[in-house]
Image (cartoon, rainbow, N blue to C red):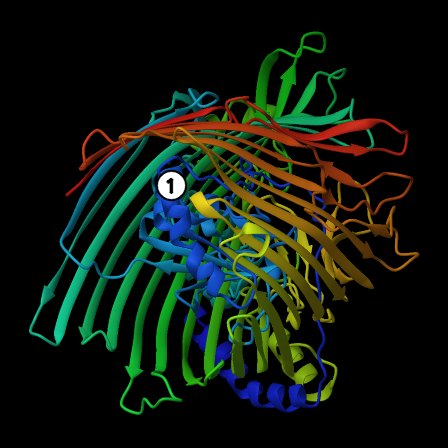
Amino acid sequence: MQTLNTKRRQLFLAITATSLGICQIAFAQNTEQKVEVPALELPQIDAPVIEEMMVTGRQQSAAQSVVTERMEEAFATDLMSSDQISRTGDSNVAVALTRVTGVTLLDGKYVYVRSLGERYSSTTLNGAAVPSPELTRNVLPLDLIPSSIVESLKVQKAYSPELAANFGGGAVDIRTKGVPDEFVFSVAMGSGMNSESDDGLTHASHGEKHNMPTQMRDALNTYQGNLSEQRIGNFYKRANPTVTNAQRDAFAVQTNRDLLLSLNRDVAIYKKSLPVDFSGSLALGNNWELNDDFSFGAVVNFGQDTKWRNKDQERRDIGSPNSRYSKTERTSEETRQVISTNFGLNFQDMHELQASAYHIENILDEASIKTGFNGSTYTLENGTEQASHVTRMEIRELDVGQLTGEHKFDQLNRDWLDTVVIDWFYSDSTVKTDVPNQSTIAIDNTIDPLTGAFISSQLSPRAAMASFEFLNLDDEVTSSGWNAKIPFVFERLELTMSGGYNYNEKSREYYGYTANIDASGNQSSVLSGDVNDVLNSNRVTNLNNNFELSVGGGFGTESYVAGQIIEGAYGMFDANWDDTWRVTGGARQETYKQGLIPVDLLDYTGESLKKIINEISTNPDQRYGFMDDDWYPSLAITYMNEGFMNAEVFQVRLSASETVVRPDLREMSDVSFISPDNNQRYRGNPYLKFSQIKHYDLRTEWFFESDNNFTATLFYKDIADPIESTNIPGSDDDIILTFENSLSGEIYGLELESLFNLGAGFFTSTNLTLSDSEIVSPEGVGYTNPVRPLTGQSEYVLNAQLGFDSDDGQHSASLVYNLFGERLYFAARMLGNTQDAYEQPFNSLDLTYSWYATDNITTKIKLGNILNEERVFEQVNSNGENVEILKQQVGTSFSLDVKYTY
């Protein structure tokens, strides 16, 4: 009899043993790539975060602090400093990035750079790869990183060879604060509220963590992955052959019922008055001169914030919007905590070592009640309404340890050779995501057919009356690398030769169990009342009532183990001729290896694993493991002319490059899974191709007196084999999403950005992105529009701000208006002439005011979404009717923060 641990060890040994075969086959393979598009089910979505360039009053000087670095970059790059972030009051990196031209967010945490989705945008922490805590995505959700630890944000929109080749819309590097130059101490506290979040929902087990019961884990081992009454009875009879059938059945029913009772069933949802938001932070650090050569610095940061939000939604079915619709009341409490420490040692400003550690924890606890009609068994006319009560806690923890070094060597300096610089890093980071007990209870409501008023309810007599999910993700990434620069100096030419190497190793384990309670066959009297009346009463312990526990979601294999290795090296040159022409180019060679094995946790026979091993060893086209190896070139030409068009600095940059975008681990696996975020069913596609991308950028920059500046950028991207999310054809209420390659895609546009000083302390900051895109899918596969825009792409994104900074430096304010145009939500792939779904324009008006009462005390007030806009998604059905398929409230937010800095 196998235990789970023994079974997992065997799985890992099998994966290790087959990895050699995987690599041998992978070397013989020529893998390709992909791009994305729509997701068809309507997920739970958060309030939108709109792109804007926000520079509040005193922030003008902060904005200029990063201009120098931006001008010195050979490739198109945008930056945002910690001062800019603090002035805007953005609490996390996700919101802060929306201040960068051409950057928008999906669901408040996934970056879209130039309208290309999260799969096209990579994120690093101080140049090192970090794992993702997302259960169904490989990308790092940027709302997890608090802005309090950020020194600056760098968004590189044109590819250069020192970056990883997985580059689409852009690369985001989160650069954290290092050790201070002097003593620092700060403490801050804040509060806030939202206009739509006065009263909300909570549940009886709120704040409690209930993992999968040990009793149930032991039973899975005892009964070999099957907890049905029949399996328990068979095992009992086998071990006790003399017992009667009646004794066997009684033992099976009682054992199964005891396992059911081991679950935490205290999940009743009720109303409550929601508390106000709270936030607090503390920073303490110093720098010490050890002697004339050495200095040592250290700093520690702590922060925590908690907020309650209602995220109510209304949904309507595209085919029958008047008979198939629902309303969802949803309340979440989110608590974020960060602890970071940094230590640094400096020798003569020539050699610097730094050690950093970060612990970031995010706890989301929510309750939701969904009620509605399906047009058949549940209708208003029949006085029947279906309801679903869901409780969910998700705990995400990110731990990062980093060592970095920079070394300058001037011993070999000559007239023609400048200081050689070598930098290196090592990063070890882990992520743990735990969903200890997500409960879903199916309920049948009786309502008044005339008024819709509630009359009574009972739990639904179905095979999955109640389900309890237990999900665990462990992800670890080790990243290391070095870079070297050798600068040569001649009379009119400055030439820098550079090169480097980096190595990333990733391992991921994802395990999921689902326990279901079958209540079919019960009388209405047994199921009448609410959750507590049924699941926490003598009705469950009464063996005459029909309740049976089973384990397994009934939809494919959700669990898997995976590994990934990316190894890259590059060489570059950077030639500056007479401060007029600059040519920068090079290439990167990168090797990519991946292995992923689906794991059926309930298969104790090992047959599923044997099947996989057999396919790996016999099928040269298998995709459980593969390798890709290629070169990725880049070239940039810059023209510089001081004084041109009355500008103090004028630059024109032209760049071209080739990169790749690879599918997510799970997207390329033979795995079927259900997203815990929206209960949507997905199926991976192991035969996805990689997406090859060609990039072209032309950026022109003018920097004038009084800190005025203007930037215009043209960009074009050609995408081969873009990957899109699409539904497998089926009925409207039986949708399964998968991933497919389209034939081609392209996106092009114009970015405009300006900062203008009006005088008397006022200034304007504006950015505008105009873009268009096209993706071409194969004919005859069911798309309503085989040629359509890319998902998430808006024809325009506008951000206009009026800022003020008082002469005495004590007051600053900004009024910011943001607008994005209609953008594709998902592509329709159904029978009939149903059109694609689009998110409608969102008008946002925000106000921020800061009062610097003294040099030590700052008070900040922020009003968000003053116009109280809602998120609306529309789709035209086959009858030509425009349907609001999804609408979600956002509310107006208010926050007050006070900070003391020594």
Q: Relative to 604, is 901 on the left or the right? A: left
- Work out whether residue 42 or residue 785 is closer to the camera in this orientation and state it: 785
- Position in image of residue 479 (x %, y %): 42, 75
Q: How many marks?
A: 1
Dividing the picture into quadrants, the one containing residue 193 is top left
Q: Which residue lies at the image location 46% right of the left edge and 46% below the top edge?
A: 705
On the rendered structure, is 229 left or right of 206?
A: right
719 relative to 346, above or below: above
- Residue farthest along the left direction in this orientation: 291
Look at mark 1 in the image and give the residue it sits on: 59
The quarter in which the C terminus is drawn is top left
Q: Residue at x 61, y 45 (%)?
A: 679
Q: Is residue 522 above or below residue 9?
A: above
Task: Judge whether 60 appears above or below 758 on screen.
Answer: below
Residue 581: x %, y % from top left: 57, 72
Please state the horizontal and vertical placement of residue 473, each as a whole percent of the image: 46, 60
Q: Position of residue 383 (x, y in %)?
A: 71, 16
Q: Is residue 207 visible?
A: yes
> Residue most toward the top?
450
Q: Which residue is found at the position 47% from the left and 59% from the top?
A: 70
Out of 263 and 44, give the one closest to the viewer. 44
In this picture, is 339 found above or below 294?
above
> Is 780 on the left-hand or right-hand side of 60?
right
Q: Badge 1: how crowded within 10 Å, few (<14), some, or many (20+)?
A: many
Residue 173 seen in this snapshot? no
Horizontal side of 698 relative to 836 (left or right) equals left
| In-front residue for pair 386/588 | 588
Which amino acid type corresponds to the residue marked 1 in the rendered image?
A: Gln
> Could you tell me which secondary element the residue under label 1 belongs to?
helix
